Image (spheres, rainbow, N blue to C red):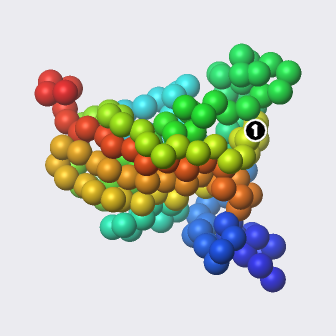
Amino acid sequence: MSANENGGTGAGAGTEFPRGVDLSDAATRSRERSGIERLLPHRDPFLFVDTIDANEDSRIVARHVFGADEFFFKGHFPEYPVVPGVILVETMAQAGGAGLAKRGVFADGSLFFLATVDKVKFRKQVRPGDEVTLVIENLRVSPRMIKQAGKAYVAGELATEAEWMCLVGSKGDL
């Protein structure tokens, strides 16, 4: 039985993701999301991380379910709703920042601002109701800068990949 058949979220080529809580349960998703809100300054409608499933020195695995009520679906596109590419990049960056914040890498109240985005590829559309698994690799982490690479998967298929750099600081010094 493959990882996908037994409830895992494999992504082909032997890649397997740890599975955490069941995000289809609204109460569980809400509880997990409140934990993410302690890590990131983002709030609805611009918080795109529901849970962190793995958080290691080199890799973070997180998930988000794009609900049919997301604000951007009304206009992108009304007759065929698709998650905008920039939102997918933002989702990966938020997952990376949340993982580092959870590990206590930065001071409380630190803010993360995208500075560069490179090597972006969109390979599969993300639609309403899709659960996205985010696999983030920490390339370089310093007190003032984060360099990460990420891949977003839907049902084990690669949807998006990118590299980015974020500047880190407090409200007064960025």
Say which amino acid is labelled 1. Arg
What residue is at 33 percent from the left and 67 percent from the top? Answer: 57
Q: Is residue 83 left or right of residue 162?
A: right
**Which residue is at the front of the view, 45 or 34?**
45
Q: Residues within 10 Å of mark 1 (few under 14, many from 20)?
A: some
**Which residue is at the front of the view, 98 or 87?**
87
Q: Residue furthest bottom?
A: 1
What residue is at 15 percent from the left and 24 percent from the top? Answer: 172
**Of helix, strand and loop, which one carries label 1?**
loop
- Residue 8: x, y in percent? 70, 70
- Residue 158: x, y in percent? 66, 56
Whether residue 64 is visible here, answered yes or no, is: no
Position of the C terminus by quadrant: top left
> Does 173 appear above or below 103?
above
Q: Which residue is mark 1?
A: 127
What residue is at 42 percent from the left and 39 percent from the top? Answer: 117
Position of the N terminus by quadrant: bottom right
- Residue 30: x, y in percent? 58, 43
Whether residue 97 is visible here, answered yes or no, is: yes
Q: Quadrant of residue 108?
A: top left
Q: Is residue 35 left or right of residue 154?
A: left
